[in-house]
């Protein structure tokens, strides 16, 4: 694990505008279809989650993320609050809906603040050469602690965020930790 993308979910690949906007009338059928065709473990996920990940996750953001992962041989470390209520196996199952499960390598530890969680992960993994932090929340002040690695995503991974992250992962900016 030499290159890492610390990924928040809500507000980064899951735009807030799309959350809770649809009913769940076809969610059960969708879950069944995806569990047959993609991953049998999807059958154990809540139907509304399956529908949201399948229909609402921002496709251009996912394409940018996949390009970064492939181009830079990076992995995803989930820093999102989703890791507080889901196991790593469940998170991988959720990401399998979008074909990204094989890139999910782990989660940050659950501590008191996202900065300390990412710092702890980096301290436990000294082989990391480059990392990007995708997050929509400026509350954590990730830009202050990781100015060369934080990429603010206001509701999606847009072109500007993609290009900045690509530069970071390519080593065009120095590796700094908080």
Image (cartoon, grey):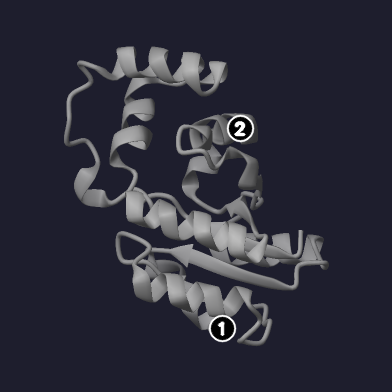
The residue at the point 44 percent across, 70 percent down is 162
Q: Is residue 94 left or right of residue 168?
A: left
Q: Which residue is mark 2?
A: 87
Residue 46: give x, y in percent of width and height.
40, 20
| SS at circle 1 | loop
Image spot of residue 120 (x, y percent): 71, 62
Residue that label 1 marks: 148
Q: Of 104 and 143, which appears nearest the observer?
A: 104
Specify whether residue 144 is in view: yes
Foreground disc of the pair 2, 1: 1
Whether 119 is drawn above or below 164: the answer is: above
Above or below 2: residue 56: above
Residue 113 appears in view: no
Q: Is 105 placed above or below 54 here?
A: below
Q: Is residue 158 left or right of residue 85?
A: left
Q: Which mark is residue 120?
A: none
The 10 Å Cα crowd at callout 1, few under 14, some 14 to 19, many 20 or more, is many
Q: Is residue 140 left or right of residue 58?
A: right
Q: Quadrant of the C terminus?
A: bottom right
Question: How far across and how far down the image is residue 53, in percent?
Answer: 37, 36
The first of marks 2 and 1 along the sequence is 2
- How packed mark 2 is, by other alpha carbons closer than 10 Å (few <14, some 14-19, many 20 or more), is few
What residue lies at 79% left-to-right and 62% top-to-bottom? 125
Report the residue at 38% width, 63% height from top: 157
Element carrying mark 2: loop
């Amino acid at each position: 694990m030499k290159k890492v993308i610390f990924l928040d979910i809500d507000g980064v690949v899951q735009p807030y505008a799309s959350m809770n906007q649809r009913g769940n009338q076809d969610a059960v059928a969708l879950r069944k279809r995806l569990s047959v065709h993609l991953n049998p473990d999807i059958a154990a996920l809540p139907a509304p989650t399956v529908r949201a990940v399948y229909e609402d996750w921002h496709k251009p953001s996912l394409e940018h993320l996949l390009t970064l992962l492939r181009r830079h041989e990076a992995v995803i470390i989930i820093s999102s609050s989703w890791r507080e209520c889901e196991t790593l196996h469940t998170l991988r199952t959720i990401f399998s809906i979008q074909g990204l499960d094989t890139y999910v390598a782990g989660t940050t530890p659950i501590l008191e603040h996202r900065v300390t969680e990412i710092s702890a992960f980096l301290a436990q993994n000294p082989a990391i050469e480059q990392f990007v932090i995708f997050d929509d929340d400026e509350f954590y002040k990730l830009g202050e602690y990781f100015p060369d690695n934080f990429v603010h995503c206001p509701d999606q991974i847009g072109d500007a965020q993609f290009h900045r992250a690509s530069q970071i992962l390519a080593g065009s900016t120095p590796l700094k930790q908080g």
